[in-house]
């Protein structure tokens, strides 16, 4: 079967018309053909041969010039493609995202859609870059990054890995700037570092996508971020006004009841002696236990004092070691069961259902991960 496409191995062939017929020529043997044509023409008519040979030489030179321009243009196109590829694969800190803030999740091939949606594709398409700037979505994204760090790193593509590290760096920079949520981010970095240590040791099995030196460099970056968070110093506000200790006791207790993590309550009690006394209130710890755990779980981990009272504070820290705490988020990702689209709540997606609100359901970070377990 003849080869009909453009041959990439050579610039092609050129044919010119001579007195003896059509002859094949290239840029290397243009002079040989011109000399041969010149000798043949001299045999017939020296004067006419000189004129024809001159015109022929001009034609050959023009064709050679056009051919050189073609090669130069092909070289320019290849250089432009290489620059575009280098621009896409550079080490800039701008994640690659699509314009849409939703993604169609399909787990198999159909006549309309081929292939299936992966976790890395969903991670690239959803607007996580701006979600970390929103206080309502921050904890949701941090928890999602932690779950991916625990078990889903080998399933991420190269672009998804790059976006993951870039978003993680933006999270660290936001915490350093705002001086808030320091402990959750430090725990996230520790989880990611432990996972990478276990995966890098199995580098011969190719469990991670990418060069091993790239992952070692990323581990060094994680260590530097953790050191920056360790050296952070909380700046007190310069404006004069009321402090938490200046508020009435009932207001202070009301504020403490809004804390959902017992470690935050312990840290708050270490600020002043008065707050330390309030942080040991039994009703505060009882409310935390009843909020995060069921009655059956609490009954299995009862701790009673000599006076017959329940130690709610000790029970809380014992319960969190045995059972997961209740996760609450201000805003989460939503999934439409009618059109199988994953989206943020305030983002409109092309739903064709008569009642779009009744087809959507909120997804926790673990539900988001489980959505791609197939």
Image: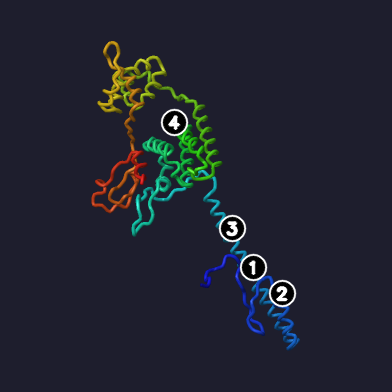
Foreground tag (2 vs 1) = 2
Q: Is residue 47 left or right of residue 18?
A: right
* Mark 2, residue position: 31
Q: Which residue is mark 3?
A: 79
Tell me the distance, in whole angstroms, between the alpha carbons under discs 2 and 1.
15 Å
Helix, strand or loop for disc 1: helix
| Residue beneath disc 4 | 187
- CB under 8 Å between discs 3 and 4: no
Query: In the rendered picture of this protein, how many numbered marks are placed on residues?
Result: 4
The residues bearing labels 3 and 4 have C-alpha atoms spaced at a distance of: 45 Å
Nearest to N terminus: mark 4 or mark 2: 2
**Residue extending furthest top?**
307
* C-alpha gap between disc 4 and disc 2: 75 Å
Say whether disc 4 or disc 1 marks the residue closer to the N-terminus.
Answer: 1
Disc marking residue 68:
1
Tell me whether the residue at label 2 lies in contact with that at label 3, contact meaning CB atoms closer than 8 angstroms: no
* Viewer-side residue, 236 vs 91: 91
Upstream in sequence: badge 3 or badge 1: 1
């Amino acid at each position: 079967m003849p080869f009909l496409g453009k041959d990439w191995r050579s610039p092609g062939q050129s044919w010119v018309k001579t007195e003896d017929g059509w002859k094949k020529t290239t840029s290397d043997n243009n002079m040989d053909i011109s000399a041969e044509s010149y000798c043949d023409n001299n045999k017939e008519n020296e004067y006419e041969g000189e004129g024809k040979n001159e015109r022929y030489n001009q034609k050959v030179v023009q064709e050679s010039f056009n051919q050189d321009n073609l090669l130069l243009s092909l070289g320019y196109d290849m250089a432009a493609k290489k620059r575009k590829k280098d621009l896409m694969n550079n080490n800039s800190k701008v994640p690659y995202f699509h314009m849409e803030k939703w993604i169609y999740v399909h787990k198999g091939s159909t006549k309309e859609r081929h292939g299936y949606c992966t976790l890395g594709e969903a991670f690239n398409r959803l607007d996580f870059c701006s979600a970390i700037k929103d206080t309502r979505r921050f904890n949701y994204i941090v928890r999602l990054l932690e779950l991916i760090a625990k078990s889903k790193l080998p399933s991420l593509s190269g672009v998804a890995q790059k976006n993951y590290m870039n978003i993680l760096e933006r999270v660290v920079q936001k915490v350093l700037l705002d001086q808030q949520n320091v402990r959750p981010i430090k725990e996230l970095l520790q989880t990611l570092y432990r996972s990478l240590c276990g995966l890098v040791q199995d580098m011969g099995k190719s469990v991670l996508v990418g060069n091993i030196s790239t992952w070692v460099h990323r581990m060094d970056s994680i260590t530097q971020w953790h050191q920056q968070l360790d050296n952070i110093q909380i700046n007190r506000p310069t404006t004069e006004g009321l402090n938490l200790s200046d508020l009435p006791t009932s207001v202070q207790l009301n504020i403490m009841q809004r804390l959902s993590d017992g470690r935050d309550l312990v840290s708050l009690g270490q600020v002043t002696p008065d707050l330390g006394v309030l942080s040991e209130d039994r009703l505060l710890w009882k409310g935390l236990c009843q909020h995060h755990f069921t009655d059956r779980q609490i009954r299995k981990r009862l701790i009673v004092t000599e006076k017959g009272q329940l130690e709610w504070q000790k029970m809380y820290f014992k319960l969190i070691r045995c059972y997961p705490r209740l996760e609450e988020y201000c805003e989460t990702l939503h999934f439409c069961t009618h059109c199988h689209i994953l989206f943020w709540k305030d983002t409109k997606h092309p739903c064709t259902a008569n009642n779009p609100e009744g087809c959507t359901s909120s997804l926790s970070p673990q539900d988001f991960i489980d959505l791609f377990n197939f």
